[in-house]
Amino acid sequence: MTDEKQTARRSQAWFGASGRSGMLYRSWMRNQGFGHEVFDGRPVIGIATSASELAPCNTHLTGVAEAVKRGVWQAGGFPLQFPTMATGETLMRPTAMLYRNLMAMEVEELVRANPLDGVVLLSGCDKTTPAMLMGAASVDLPALMVTGGPMLNGKYRGEEVGSGTHVWKFEEDLKTSRMTQEECFFAEGCMARSAGHCMTMGTASTMACMAEALGMQLPGSATWPAVDSRRMETAQAAGRRIVQMVHEELRPSHILTREAFENAIRTNAAIGGSTNAIIHLTALAGRVGVELAPEDFDALARAVPTLVNLMPSGKYLMEDFCYAGGLPAVLGELLRGGMLHGEQITVTGRGIAENVADAERIGPEVITGLEAPFQPAGTGTAVLRGNLCPDGAVIKQSAASPRLLTHRGPARVFDSPESYHAVCDDPDLDVDEDTVLVIRNAGPKGYPGMPEVSNVPLPTKLLKAGVTDMVRICDGRMSGTGYGTVVLHVAPEAAVGGPLALVRDGDPVVLDTPNRTLRLDVDDAELERRRAAWTPPAPQHTSGYAWLYTQHVEQADRGADFGFLRGCRGFGVPRESH
Ligand code: FES
Ligand code: MG
């Protein structure tokens, strides 16, 4: 937390300067047609937009930025829009996650290096939301997020089609000839009907809700569809509000307290949110000096039922969630159950309880009540420990098959996702439905970037035999839209010598989710022998960003941030540039 008070408007160190420097700072800005009056000391508001045609979920943010600008002008501020990189989930290889920290670093440095007094963060696709929050938290100037909103519900042949979730389903339908390639091409278009991010409760929707539950975006802002005019209304309100936040000196460090994270963790359980929230919230907490352990997620969420019936765990989509009352209705319900810190201050300058005092649950089948929840408490994401994951692993129980949550089966080990994919269609693959598929070297350092590869498709021969789920264990992540009995985020990862590296084909693996354990039933002496013989994989990168990443990325239980980016470095005005 930074306790410095802004004695004078920060931007005045630039625009209020006298002599040559002041001329340089002002004159070039005037080539955009601004009159001299914009330099009079009014709050200068950065609008950081991650719009990019390479990140289709964020492309429309250019329009959202215009609405924010209107609001900033209305409230007497001076808006300046600037681009940031966009970690688009669908196109970036080897994984957008490799670039989350880079984007966070970029946002942090751009905000600090420029004459800004406050910033509005425009995000959408999965990693763009945590990246922007992390960067802003490490500067600690007043900051307000506007996520871009979900796409409209997918519609295919009378069926509601959820982004991500239906990709896995269509793939299985193709493999089992329930769908032709032609039909699949058509369905692809039906799944993405408008601008916006995934409209399932995947990582983007989850992180938008997390931003709102943390108090970093305006109430109701997470769920308006990207193309709904109220998305623009919210954005304009955000523009007005950030100017006031600068006057009030309301900063992320006031909002992102331990209580705020506890609110977010409980909310994530109530919405049936993505497992990726665990990684991102942990990383964000590290920026503001809040210590979150993996078990905090389990312990805080255990008493919280899943209220929201959305894919991938349920039936509906974000548009339905919005019309049913959106996140404020969920927060209202959690408050009624005494599950949130209602006083925790948010970007509105008010506590979360006051923000949602008028919230209504309009669609009770989409947002269920505490008395008859969609899924009972204790079915959320569980954190496991054991000799296979001494620093933790997670399993999303609501996306798993209940009968497999307790399971003992022989391991079949693959040293990379690719080595599994190479044989998964093989009719003679030596697996049956009790086999535990172990996919390793997909962790932060090992891949690198900890991609969403953990829920590998089932072996084709088992799919054809009608098997619908198997236990899979991986040191990578799973898409928030994915499902299956998949143990994720195994830490430490195989590439740094975690026990996952020592598993051999046929080793009995014991998953006991009710007791929160994941064990390899192999004796310690044998594991020690294997450890002594283990050699780390050769480095894949010896220079460039990927090298920097592998040198500094922390393990999943620490949020996979760079160690050197933890903490807040403040908003001090850097030295003169001329
Ligand atoms: Fe961008 Fe899902 S791919 S939000
Ligand atoms: Mg995703």
Image (cartoon, helix red, strand yellow):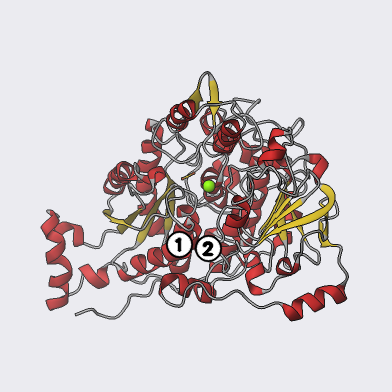
Whether residue 32 is visible, yes or no, is yes
- Numbered mark located on residue 449 in the image: 2
One can see residue 3 in this view: no
Mark 1, residue position = 99
Amino acid type of the residue that numbered disc 1 sits on in the rendered structure: Tyr
Secondary-structure class at tag 2: loop
Residue that appears at 16% across and 57% down? 37
> Residue 389's quadrant in the figure?
bottom right
The image's mark for residue 434 is none
Compared with 460, 503 (above or below) is below
Q: Residue at 23% across / 78% down in the picture?
A: 577
Q: Relative to residue 26, is residue 551 depicted above or below? A: below
In screen coordinates, is 236 left or right of 492?
Answer: left
Q: Is residue 356 left or right of residue 120?
A: right
Rate crowding at label 2 as few (under 14), some (14 to 19) or many (20 or more) other CA atoms within 10 Å.
Answer: many
Q: Pointer 2 and pointer 1: residues touching (CB < 8 Å)?
A: yes
The structure residue drawn at horizontal position 59% and vertical position 46%, both measured from the top left corner, is 480
Regarding mark 1 in the picture, which secondary structure is present there? Answer: helix
Q: Earlier in the sequence, mark 2 or mark 1?
A: 1
